[in-house]
Image (cartoon, rainbow, N blue to C red):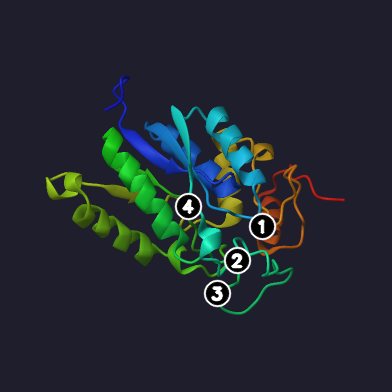
Amino acid sequence: MNQGGKPKAVVLVSGGLDSATALAMAGDQGYACYALSLDYGQRHHAELAAARRVAQSLGALEHKVIRLDLTSIGGSALTDTRIAVPDRPAEGIPVTYVPARNTIFLSLALAWAEVIGAWDLFIGVNAVDYSGYPDCRPEYIEAFQRLCQLATRAGVEGGSFKVHAPLIHMSKADIIQAGTRLGVDYGLTVSCYAADQAGRACGRCDSCRLRAKGFADAGVSDPTVYQG
């Protein structure tokens, strides 16, 4: 428990609208939130500045940024500048998939949770309006939660971890409407796969298209600033 009697939760915060909404939901559910972001060599570094803004605006008790170099592995348009970010939808799993990213991120969140005495992890994955990533599916979240019990001292000694994916069955419009009700300022967020250093969106990538459609379908004004 935190000093105020609230249970602690580690929330993965990327700087995009989904993770911002997940953080707002965790706080609304009464958790003392510890925000975790990863500087993994992604080409869109503006999202880390956005993550700091989001964590501060939504009252995270602490915001930790961990550095790791996934560019040394590559295999994704987000970590290898030789692979172009696509400007149109593709069949199958897209090149913006980062190999094992959510497994790596959730493992680090789990490690921090075990250190601070938190039993709850939040991640803003979505299986409805998503880009075909295998680590955004409900069966993946369920499997990782089982792993939490097997892979930690806290789990083996009788503790029970819960991996929360509150957005997983929501459309992008539903997510935006929910976050708006909770006071999320989406103008602080950056979702674009190819954002410039100022955080301005390209307007062409899959993430930009899903975001724009979400705001339109939600009937909420889109605060996204675009390049050019």
Q: What element carries label 1?
A: loop
| Dot 2 alpha-carbon crowd within 10 angstroms: few under 14, some 14 to 19, many 20 or more | many
Q: Which of marks 4 and 2 is nearer the N terminus?
A: 2
Q: Disc 3 and disc 1: Cα gap in Å?
A: 15 Å
Q: Are marks 4 and 3 in contact (CB under 8 Å)?
A: no
Percent x, y of residue 59: 50, 27
Which of discs 4 and 3 lies nearer the camera? The answer is 3
- Tag 4 residue: 167
- Residue beneath disc 3: 93
Horizontal side, residue 32 vs residue 20: left or right: left
Residue type at tag 2:
Thr
Q: Which mark is residue 193?
A: 1
**Mark earlier in primary sequence (3, 1):** 3
Residue at the (51%, 54%) spot, across then down? 69
- Residue 80 is marked as none
Residue at image x 47%, y 60%?
101
The amino acid pointed to by label 1 is Tyr
